[in-house]
Image (tube, helix red, strand yellow):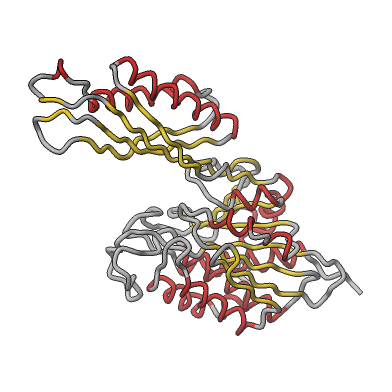
Amino acid sequence: MPIIDRIAGFADEIAAWRHDLHAHPELQYDVHRTAGFVAEKLRAFGCDEVATGIGRTGVVGVIRGRAHGSNRAIGLRADMDALPIQEVRDLPYRSTVPGKMHACGHDGHTAMLLGAAKYLTETRDFDGSVVLIFQPAEEGGGGGAAMVADGMMERFGVEAVYGLHNIPNQPLGTFAIRPGAIMASTDRFTITVRGKGGHAALPHKAVDSVLVAAHTIVALQSVVSRTVSPLDSAVVSVCHVDAGETFNVLPAEAVLRGTMRALTAECRTLMLERIEAIVTGVAAAFGAESEIVFDGGYPVTENHSAEASFMADVAARVVGEDAVERDVAPMMAAEDFAYMLQERPGAYIFMGNGPSAGLHHPEYDFCDEAAPYGASLWARLIETALPVANP
């Protein structure tokens, strides 16, 4: 019951595709080999249309069903890019590119959608079209926004769009989803503190940028604890400090870099305002100056209620109702599938990857046993959303 028999029959082929992709990771928009691999497979399967260069290096495949009465089109999305991380596990298919690896499972996401494409081109048991979206630059490059800006939704007539991500240590053969916000917005910030350099033994004749930076870091923790409602979820983290070059010189400048996350647009706006006020206010109190630059990140990934319920129903058809969590807690990580959900109704679901190192960890690896579940979910979603009418 859990997995479509035909997909289970070529599970080893899906795994082989993933291993090839895993061994040849590429970053952000520089996914030319990966995109070529995907386009070649889609053409070999018999997709009715294969378009490349969407959103710079994205690939879109179109499969038309055996019935054509509805003219409807449903989008399914997978991300293709890897991460700038050195792989440490000695896998038979380990990364061949120093400093790059698939540490988030995008190789598995791509392979699963290819598996669904192979099945759907063989069966075509649906009325309308499936639009297969293979996206570059999810890891910080905004490839989802680039594909949307390139007119993808209009060009291929997408009426609804769905996405998926594996989750380490969520049991194999399970799915989890929720209506509303399922992943956070993200914004990066860079704070430059400018004081007055001097000798460490004469601090009264300097304006200590390191001290100002330290107070700034502590004060920023009040944004979540004292500005954001306790009923909301938010994160402010300073992750990088750069100041000084030696042990006895107070540097004139210190630089802080970090991230903030929120689950609503209103909370995000409030945090942006408070962070800026704290940064400038703390500096002024010490006779220094601080400048903050926000690097706009991804918006909240917000599932549409009807589509989230529908996706959960389809998942239950694949793995059974007991294996589907319909109100999972949101994650504070971010996802640029959010841009597609701003353009069209749809939903994003989590899929169990079984016991595993965490995402973005140098020991992480996608579980090949999970792939048939994801490919089966995609196939059943299309067959359910675009049913062939009885004669």
Left or right, 247 with respect to 265, comes to left
Residue at (83, 67) in percent of width and height: 71
Left or right, 126 with respect to 197, comes to right
* Image: 223 above or below 13: above
Looking at this view, name the residue that lies furthest to the right: 391
Q: Quadrant of the N terminus?
A: bottom right
Horizontal and vertical percent position of residue 298: 53, 45
Q: Is residue 283 visible?
A: yes
Horizontal and vertical percent position of residue 116: 62, 72
Q: Quadrant of the C terminus?
A: bottom right
Residue at (46, 73) in percent of width and height: 18
Left or right, 229 with respect to 50, comes to left
* Image: 383 above or below 272: below
Residue at (68, 57) in percent of width and height: 161
Horizontal and vertical percent position of residue 204: 15, 15
Determine which quarter of the picture holds residue 147.
bottom right
Determine which quarter of the picture holds residue 268.
top right
85 and 3: which is toward the camera: 85
148 and 75: which is toward the camera: 148
Q: Is residue 373 visible?
A: no
Determine which quarter of the picture holds residue 188.
top left
